Image (spheres, rainbow, N blue to C red):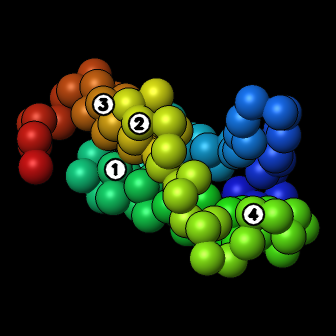
Amino acid sequence: MMYTSARWQITPEAKELFVLPIFSIVCFVFTYRNVRIAPSLGFALAFISGLLIDIVCAVDLAHLMPEVGLTTFYQGIGGAGDKDGLFIVPIFTYLTLQYAQFRQGYRLAWL
């Protein structure tokens, strides 16, 4: 489902991938409906789903643009550093699930 929301924005300066973090949204909806999801599980699954969609879209771009090539396609995966969604979205998911459980009266589990 995240694959259908992914889009590339290609400019002369950069190639940017925009993805809607659907897994995190699903976690938030479940939490709103009082389904308890461990924050560490939310972090892990948000990271894995983001990494997989990043890899799949990078391979797609390598097929669409022959100048990128299959030998260097991986250089853009997580390439924005600490501003990358692959870094920010799992942390935001973890903190939001942790806060929601605190508000619902659960004991905080930091692991």
Left or right of 3 on screen, residue 108? left
Which residue occupies the foreground of this view, 30 or 25? 25
Residue 32 vertical placement versus 54 (above, below): above
Which residue occupies the foreground of this view, 7 or 90? 7
Outermost residue to the right:
64
SS state under label 2: helix
Residue that badge 2 annotates? 81
Mark toward the viewer: 1 or 4: 4
Mark toward the viewer: 1 or 2: 2
Residue that badge 3 annotates? 95
Q: Find the distance from the CA under tag 2 to the CA under tag 3.
A: 20 Å
Residue that badge 4 annotates? 68
Residue density around tag 1, few if under 14, some if 14–19, many if 20 or more, within 10 Å: some
Left or right of 101 on screen, residue 8? right
Q: Find the distance from the CA under tag 4 to the CA under tag 3.
A: 36 Å
Residue that badge 1 annotates? 43
Q: Find the distance from the CA under tag 3 to the CA under tag 1.
A: 9 Å
Cβ atoms under marks 1 and 4 closer than 8 Å: no
Mark toward the viewer: 2 or 3: 2
- Ranked by sequence position, the earlier of labels 4 and 3 is 4
Q: Indicate the quadrant containing the N terminus: top left, top right, bottom left or bottom right.
A: bottom right
Q: Which of the 4 image quarters holds residue 71?
A: bottom right
Q: Position of residue 100 (x, y in %)?
A: 34, 29
Dot 4 amino acid type: Val
- Ranked by sequence position, the earlier of labels 4 and 2 is 4
Mark toward the viewer: 4 or 3: 4
- Ranked by sequence position, the earlier of labels 2 and 3 is 2
